[in-house]
Image (cartoon, rainbow, N blue to C red):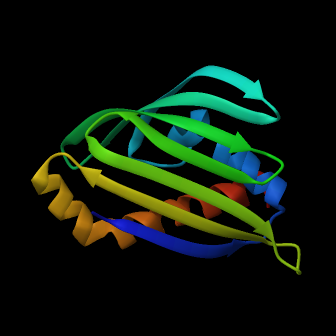
Amino acid sequence: MPSLSKQISIPYAPEQIFDLVSDVARYPEFIKWIRDMKVSGLREEQGIRYFRGEASVGFKGFSERFSTDVAADPEKHTIDVSLVRGPFRRLKNRWALGKASDGTTLVDFFIDYEFRNPVLSLLARANTDLAVSKIMTAFRQEADRRYG
């Protein structure tokens, strides 16, 4: 049952990082294992944007599709992701963005997941930290490209 929390600092405003993280339709542009992303059901309630993301991912001969529900709160600078369907038994993800005194953004990333397939679960358990580090690097590089 892998879960991981990671904190990093990115030298851009929280609003910019929120826009980057909540723009899931563009993930295939900078996260190499996301082959396709479709966004549907966009609606807003009390300032929070809700939508569904359906991703096609693949790496090293492995290919899967999964769907998540996303709640993006621009006032609190949080993005919450929960599983709808896919190869996971469980998936919860949260991005919480805060402004540091030097104007940078403190990114608090949390993920808790479990694959249905025991072999994938074993592989994921051994590689969770590496995968999250690669995700953080991809977002940092995309922030540099967009805002640097």
The answer to whether residue 110 is above or below residue 44 is below
The answer to whether residue 52 is above or below residue 81 is above
- Rendering quarter of residue 130: bottom left
Q: Residue at x 74, y 51 (%)?
A: 18
Q: With 125 as the anchor, is 96 left or right in this view?
A: right
Q: Residue at x 70, y 57 (%)?
A: 143
Q: Position of residue 94 (x, y in %)?
A: 56, 55
Q: Which residue is the extreme one toward the left?
A: 119
Q: With 120 as the anchor, is 142 left or right in this view?
A: right
Closer to us: 63 or 82: 82
**Is residue 23 shown to the viewer in this render?**
no
Q: Residue at x 61, y 57 (%)?
A: 95
Q: Which residue is the extreme one toward the top?
A: 41
State which quarter of the image contains the C terminus: bottom right
Q: Which residue is the extreme one toward the bottom?
A: 101
**Is residue 116 shown to the viewer in this render?**
yes
- Rendering quarter of residue 145: bottom right
The answer to whether residue 66 is above or below residue 129 is above
Q: Position of residue 112 (x, y in %)?
A: 40, 59
Closer to us: 53 or 91: 91
Q: Position of residue 69 (x, y in %)?
A: 52, 34
Q: Position of residue 31 (x, y in %)?
A: 49, 49
Closer to us: 143 or 127: 127
